[in-house]
Amino acid sequence: MSDASAAGPLRRLVATAIDFVVVPVVSIGVMLVSGAMESAEAYAGYQPILRPILLGIAGYLLVNGWLLYRHGQTLGKRIMGLAIVHHSDGSKASLGRLVGVRALFFPLLYLPIGFAAIGAWALLPVVDNASILLRSRRCLHDLAAGTRVVRTRR
């Protein structure tokens, strides 16, 4: 894949939008099935935050884990004909880079929704995704993981 061209901003935006919708729906399903979201009373008092976070990660991996492992793609990237590769040589990116570094940025997309009151921190997802407009076509999470997103089909 070393000769593949960088993915354009519109394709990446659409892929992100697909993941932005699908992953939370599956994650909420996982939370409902597991009992983490049993009733409104559970949220009236102390609700341990770790359990929903871990179940959200489980939802992300249910949707994207196999695709990331086998093809270097999330569901949105697969639909849009994109793949994540190692920046230096275009080879398949390791699962550690894909999940251990890049995926850490995905929850940041939701910060403006839930934590808009925390100020500048909520701008991080905007800055991360806006950096795709730079010549390198790499977001901050691409830079952190040493990856880039390329087109897999024309």
Image (tube, rainbow, N blue to C red):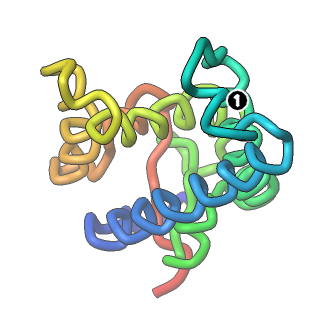
Above or below, comparing residue 65 to residue 146 in the picture: below
Question: Mark 1 highlights which residue?
Answer: 96
Q: Is residue 79 left or right of residue 16?
A: right
Q: Is residue 147 left or right of residue 7?
A: right
Quarter residue 89 falls in: top right
State which quarter of the image contains the N terminus: bottom right
Q: Percent x, y for residue 50?
A: 67, 17
Q: Amino acid at mark 1?
A: Gly
Above or below, comparing residue 8 to residue 115 in the picture: below
Q: Nearer the viewer, residue 82 or 130?
A: 130
Q: Is residue 1 visible?
A: no
Q: How many marks?
A: 1
Q: Percent x, y for residue 32?
A: 76, 49
Q: Is residue 73 left or right of residue 80?
A: right
Above or below, comparing residue 46 to residue 67 in the picture: above
Q: Is residue 138 visible?
A: yes
The residue at 67%/49% (across/down) is: 27
Q: Nearer the viewer, residue 61 or 74?
A: 61
Secondary structure, mark 1, is: helix
Q: Nearer the viewer, residue 21 or 88?
A: 21
Name the residue furthest bottom. 154
The residue at 69%/57% (across/down) is: 26
The residue at 75%/40% (across/down) is: 38
Above or below, comparing residue 11 to residue 104 in the picture: below
Q: Nearer the viewer, residue 149 or 51?
A: 51
Q: Percent x, y for residue 134?
A: 16, 48
